[in-house]
Image: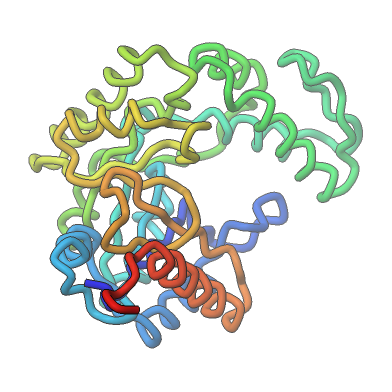
Amino acid sequence: MSGASPLSILIYHRVLAAPDPLLPGVPDAATFDRHMRLLKRCFRVLPLSAALRQLQLGTLPARALCITFDDGYADNAELALPILRRHGLVATFFIATAYLDGGRMWNDDVIDYVRQAPPGRLDFSMVGCGSLPGLTVAQKRQAIDQVLTQLKYLPPATRQEMADRLAPPRRQALMMTSGQVRALQAAGMELGAHTHRHPILTAMADADAYADMAEGKAVLEAITGRRATLFAYPNGKPDTDYNQRHAEMARALGFEAALSTVAGAAGPSSDPWQLPRYTPWQRDSVRFVLRLALSRYRENVNRRAALPPLLGG
């Protein structure tokens, strides 16, 4: 087992038709296509469920890697899926079910408020954030980050109420339809649960957190007709966005694995209900592959340091 290969799990959220200055970390279709071409060439890309079984058995092949998407944006089905199919790759899509069929996540209302505001001061007084500069793209990005950070950890109902105050007229549907979720499944992609309303679980009473996790699982299963065995924590930072109690909830709900957003690669000793993932934000191909290699190297070093010394060593 000591020589077992680590498992890299990548997180994506969206794939855009063209680069967006307000979302510099989100790949456009050309960048995502380049990522997938590199992954197919340099790694053994596996379905997540199969990779996790092999990880537990100690039979994971070298350079094993999985691709995941969080939230359930429509561009996952419209843009990412054709690219994945062209390269013969399987990804796992974690769906926040409350926003399917015409819903919209609160953070996108904040971003669209900034996007549609005329250049100048950005008025966030209605959500208690005062006035922020918004003349340049950099200032608009900073304003978005500041407001999202301030609202993120409010109770879910309060956070949504604040976002509703900012929400401009909606120009397009951002999230998938139930039909698109089924289309992903029909194309051979895997689907996992991501709660129902995408709350910060630590900001809720335990009973409410459990109910939201359970609802997301039940709604997804009703759409797909299959049992949901994989789960991803919203935001996913341990002890900030979720904690050990929520990991126990995931296990109690019948999930076989749950994913965090702790950077790194998973090893044989990783907690199945707190698996690490890595966000591939680099557009440059060389840095993209090097950062992946570094995350795998660190997992190997950490795991070997934790191994007991050999007898007589």
Name the spot of residue 215 as percent of width and height, x first: 24, 23
In terms of depth relative to the viewer, which is nearer, 171 or 121?
Answer: 121
Return the x and y of residue 198 as percentages of the image width and height.
Answer: 42, 30
Provide residue 48's location: percent of width, then percent of height: 24, 60
Q: How is the image coloured?
A: rainbow
In the figure, is residue 210 to the left or right of 224?
right
On the question of residue 1 being in view, the answer is yes
Q: Residue 276's image quarter? A: bottom left
- Front-most of residues 155 and 113: 155
How many numbered marks, from 0 up? 0
* Residue at 84% from the left image edge and 19% from the top image edge: 130
For the point 35% across and 15% down, which residue is it? 206
Q: Nearer the viewer, residue 48 or 300?
A: 300
- Residue at figure coordinates x 86%, y 30% from the top left: 132
Side of 264 where 2 appears, left or right:
left
Is 284 left or right of 73, judged from the image as shown? right
Instruction: Specify the quadrant that holds the C terminus.
Output: bottom left
Identity of the residue drawn at 57% across and 35% down: 108
Q: Residue furthest bottom?
A: 41
Occupied quadrant, residue 188: bottom left
**The N terminus sits in image quarter:** bottom left
Left or right: 184 as drawn, with respect to 236: left
Let me know if residue 87 appears in the view: no
